[in-house]
Image: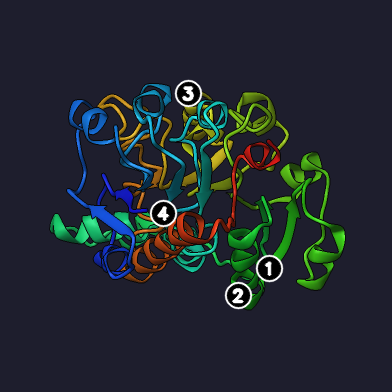
Amino acid sequence: MSFHVLVPDNVNQKAIDILRNRAGIRVSAPGKLEVPTLLDRIADAHAIIIRSGVRADAELIEAASELKAIARAGVGVDNVDLAAASAKGIVVMNTPGGNTISTAEHSFGLMIALSRHIPQGHQSLLEGRWDRAAFGGVELKGKTLGIIGLGRIGAAIAARAQAFEMNVIAHDPYLPPQAAVEINVPLLDLREVYASSDYLTLHALATDETRGMINARTIATMKDGIRIINAARGALINTADLAAALSSGKVAGAALDVFEQEPPPTDHPLIGHPKVIHTPHLAASTSDAQVTVAVEAAQLILDFLLDGKTANVCNPEVLEV
């Protein structure tokens, strides 16, 4: 039997080559497709590989009459309707480890840039000014970094922060306490992390429990002058509440790589705010990470279609049927 694998997103060529070099696999890799074309092209696909540029929503899944598997070349599956996939018996898999280092390094880079006003100083010099006095910063050494979500990325950030002689604390209700002990990071109640942190970096998924977790109420419990970094999910932050806290001085600064709506609207209150630095969802955008997640996604599809093997399944209920 021949299986059709559709790649309707911009996935690294090495993944395409791996798929094409396997007998029994027919590959269509047109690059990113717009919705009407994608709905037509997916009809006979047995598997698809996507990144964040394609939404595998209920409409798409309904149009995929032969679909057996979806592989997300990346960590989050916010762009996949897991309930719709499960209802049709479609396995959804991701590649949680492939962009760990890239995301951790970007998050840490944002924290350094935020502390030393690097983007603002760069822009000032471009504009012909020499504003040394305007951009005095703070050191990371001796500061307390609170990490929300101590998974792969959170743990990688903890290691880097410890190398910079920061005090690292974390909150993660799903992590076994022993795992935190092994990397010398105390697991604390979320309220304690909020109250104790000089810096707060977010590495949680957007769920009913975490959506809007950074809001006026929680910010009020934090230290005056806290700095917040988010390279996880834009929905974790209440935008209006953070903007108000920045303007009041309660929050000293924020560094954002993600937004609830991407790209953000032109009137977004945090874009251009003098206390905010921002990047357009670049955390996983290194050549290294894109190769790794693409190759891992291709291998997940091959293992599933040819050998019936699964890994990193995001909707395990389909395996219980």
On screen, residue 208 above or below 181: above
Amino acid marked by disc 1: Gly
The answer to whether residue 32 is seen in the rendering is yes
Which callout, 3 or 2, points at the residue further toward the start of the chain? 2
Amino acid at the residue labelled 4 = Ala
N-term-proximal mark, 4 vs 2? 4
Q: How is the image coloured?
A: rainbow
Taking depth in this image into account, of 115 and 304 the one nearest to the observer is: 304
In front: mark 4 or mark 2? 4
Mark 3 secondary-structure assignment: helix
Q: CA distance from mark 3 to mark 1?
A: 31 Å
Image-based side of 293 in relation to 272, left or right: right
Which class describes the residues within 10 Å of circle 2: few (<14), some (14-19), or many (20+)? some
- Front tag of 1 and 2: 2
Q: Position of residue 90 (x, y in %)?
A: 51, 37
> Can you give x and y, in whole percent of width and height, for residue 205 in the image?
59, 41
User: Label 2 amino acid?
Assistant: Phe
Among the two numbered marks 3 and 1 on one chain, the one whose residue lies closer to the N terminus: 1
Report the Cα–Cα distance between label 4 and label 3.
32 Å
Residue drawn at x 83%, y 44% is: 189
Quadrant in which residue 63 is drawn: top left
Label 3 with label 1: CB-CB less than 8 Å: no
| Residue in the image at 31% along x and 49% along y | 4
Residue 240 circle label: 3
Numbered disc total: 4
Disc 3 marks a residue whose amino acid type is Ala
Kindly identify which numbered label has been placed on residue 73: 4
Of pointers 4 and 3, the one earlier in the residue sequence: 4
Which label lies toward us, 4 or 3?
4
Front tag of 4 and 1: 4
> Badge 1, how many Cα within 10 Å: few under 14, some, many 20+?
few
Residue located farthest toward the front when viewing the structure as drawn: 1
